[in-house]
Amino acid sequence: MAFLGNFRASRLLEQILGSDGAVGRDTTRAIEGLRSLGAASVEPILAALPNASRPVHAALVDALAGIANGKTLPLFLDALAEGSPRLVPGIVEALKGAEDLPAASLIDALRKPGIPKAPLLEVIKAKHDRIPPRELLNAAAALDGKDKAVLFRLVGEAADAGLVPDLVNRLQGRDLNARLHIIAILARFDTPEVRYALQGQLADGNKIVRSAALGALSRMEGPVDAELVCRLLCDADIEVQNRAVDVLIRSKDPETVRFLIPVLKDENEYARRSAVEVLNEVGDAGSLKYLLTALKDSDWWVRSRAGDALGKIGGPRVIQAVLELARDEDPELRRSAIEILNQTKDDIAVAQLIEATHDPDWWVSERAVDALAAIGSKRALPRLLEMLDSAGEQQLPTILRAVAAVGDGNCVDAVLPLLHRTDRAVRIESIHCLARLADGQRLDDVRLLLQALAGTGDESIFPATQEAMAELERRFSATDELSATMVDRSPSMMGRAPRGSEAPRGLLHDTNVMQAIRRVEPEQAAAPRLDISSLKPGDVLEGRYKFIKRIGKGAFGTVLLMEDEVVGESLILKFLNPGVAEDEETMQRFVHELRYSRKITHQNVIRIYDFLAIRGNYAISMEYFPSHTLGSEVASDKPLELRRAIRFGMDICTGMAVAHQAGIVHRDLKPANVLINDAGELKIVDFGVASAHREGDTQLTKTGFVIGSPKYMAPEQILGKSIDERADIYAVGVILYELLTGVPPYSEGDHMAVMYQHVQGRATPPAERNPALPAGLGEIVMKAMAVERAERFQSMDELKSALEAFA
């Protein structure tokens, strides 16, 4: 019988092939004949299918679709197992069109070894509405990779409330990919059972699971466990933190504020900022009062961190609540409120801050003055001038700084009487204030006054007069006449400057730095020089700085970790090495680092505090930031994880944008000058070779010598041309190249060879070194590294915006 069936099938096939598949009565009868033969027709049709013309192919597929059923399916599966690329598409089309094929049998076929999954999944996709969702779910759990994803998408389309218990039960499995797919499906079902199950995933050790569960919860309207979600504001992963914020804001649980308290105490700044972001959406004056009251008995540093976070992010709800608390009966709450307003720098707080200057608590009053100075509103000026007549000696320096910040030449007469006060701090601050207030009309008056003060022989105020004169010179385009007023009139040097010689200038002026320092610190010049190498842990310098350990030593200086016993905080002292301390240009580098770096106050830039003369040594004091260099992150010549690399690049752009706004170009950006702590926070260091190009300061270069690091230098810097912000943009491009590929764009050969390669600009595209990079990212890096400045991004903000698409 099989022989007869095959013979009949062959005759019918010949008839179809002879008609070239043309639709007609004979062809239709032949197709029906093949279908009636059933299994006997399958093998002959499959044999003819690969070489059939397009019309014949369609006719044969139509015939196979009528034959395919539960009994004949094994024949089709055997053909699929052979894997002929010309045969498989026809089998798939036939099975998709088969009306009598039990779809559940396709699920069973997925479990059979040797049967290719991809074509079967195509058929299942076409017939999935006939398959019970539970069977799809069971089959999906047994597959791998892309096959698993295909079936889970079908489960998602078919899932109903009846499948939810099965989905929840499978959340406890070990298959990470399956759990992620299930979480995405459960997001459609906002029920207590589902929310409870998803919240159970928030403690999972895998950040991807935590993030996915939060993402699902953020799309639900029902209540969540606010305490549990608040804990994730302190999560080590930024994405988890952000999604926790979304969930808490969406839920608007009034109890949320209670659980934000431990987050606001956290060491991690990102966690504190996340808490404030939530507070801005769910808090009010009552809840903020509860929060600040709860923090009141905490360590002052905890209160400071919390207040700092509330102030820096601000927001209308926080500011409005704080304005109300600034009138509270509790002085501790008023203090906290004023500290927050100090950070917000929002103009809407001016009226309340002016009122707060009348507060009986001196702390509230003084910090209100500081806040008014930071905001810079002239509306505060009448009250500040009134306070100059009524305030005590201790408050006057603060008020004078505020007057200098918001006042003008009309305020000079109000400040003049304070020059005769007995308190040295008041007199010094008055001198600085006058230098800031002087305008074109009062310039000569202030200048003559400073000359007179400099000539009184009062050593206690002489440095202040010199600095004030330098300030006037900077503001009013120094003339010969003004420069002449800079003749050293210190008591120890009075009358000793040789006729016609150039006199020393202020302590932080670029020229004659050594003379200026030794004039200001005459007693230190005579003291025995401190041997830095002899310091032992516990030794205290200047009655204040306790030595902890040496962190490092380089060609320019020795870096020591100290504890400032006055304020109880760790800091860094960067000492100039004695062997180069007499070199004027080296000293200029240190002074540059102080003068220009300390202008920048930003979380992504190391904070510089002061320039110190300590027993014949000179040092910069700066923020202590336990960390490692960005260079150590790519030491293995392997690319960084993409999101981490992009985040670092954006943080560098953010910090450098602030520096550029202050007119400062770093000129030596490289991974060694970027620090990363364990929380992933980034800070830029070493502005020692920075050029304040807007102020026209002298560049720290010698003939034929270019400052910078060859691997990261812009072409114009290598060629000795003028430098602007775009040199730093080029350096960030090079750093990004290294982070994303594992190697710098140019590194072969000696320094001269590397510099030549930068000028040539023929770097291998990043995507060729790392094919996994998303499309478009390599072009951003190459644009930042363009040889011609005009072809680069023109600002750090522009480069950061381009990177945000990949964050």
Image: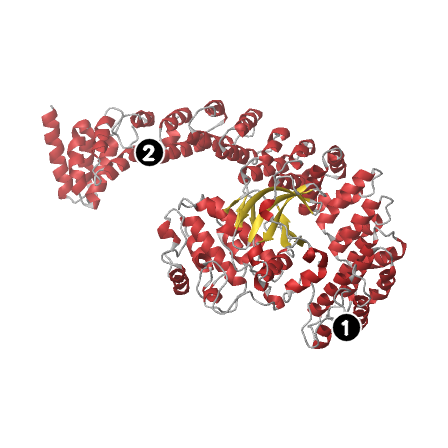
The correct choice, above or below, for 270 with respect to 590 in the image is above
Dot 1: within a 10 Å radius of its alpha carbon, few (fewer than 14), some, or many (20 or more) residues? few
Q: Earlier in the sequence, mark 1 or mark 2?
A: 2
Screen quadrant of the N terminus:
top left
Q: CB of mark 1 within 8 Å of CB of mark 2?
A: no
Looking at the picture, tell me which residue is in the foreground, 766 or 556: 556
Q: Is residue 462 above or below residue 359?
A: below
Three-letter amino acid code at the position of disc 1: Gly
Q: Residues within 10 Å of mark 2 (few under 14, many from 20)?
A: many
- Whole-number angstrom distance, CA of label 1 to CA of label 2: 83 Å
Which residue occupies the foreground of this view, 377 or 418? 418
Q: Is residue 307 left or right of residue 91?
A: right
Number of numbered labels in the structure image: 2
Locate residue 43, reporting x and y percent: 16, 31
Disc 2 target residue: 121
Residue hosting label 1: 440
Q: Secondary structure at mark 1?
A: loop
Q: Locate residue 221: give its quadrant.
A: top right
Q: Position of residue 578 (x, y in %)?
A: 58, 55
Can you give x and y, in whole percent of width and height, for residue 374 in the image? Answer: 73, 54
**Residue 535 on image: x %, y %:** 61, 44
The amino acid marked with disc number 2 is: Leu
Q: Residue at x 80, y 52 (%)?
A: 369
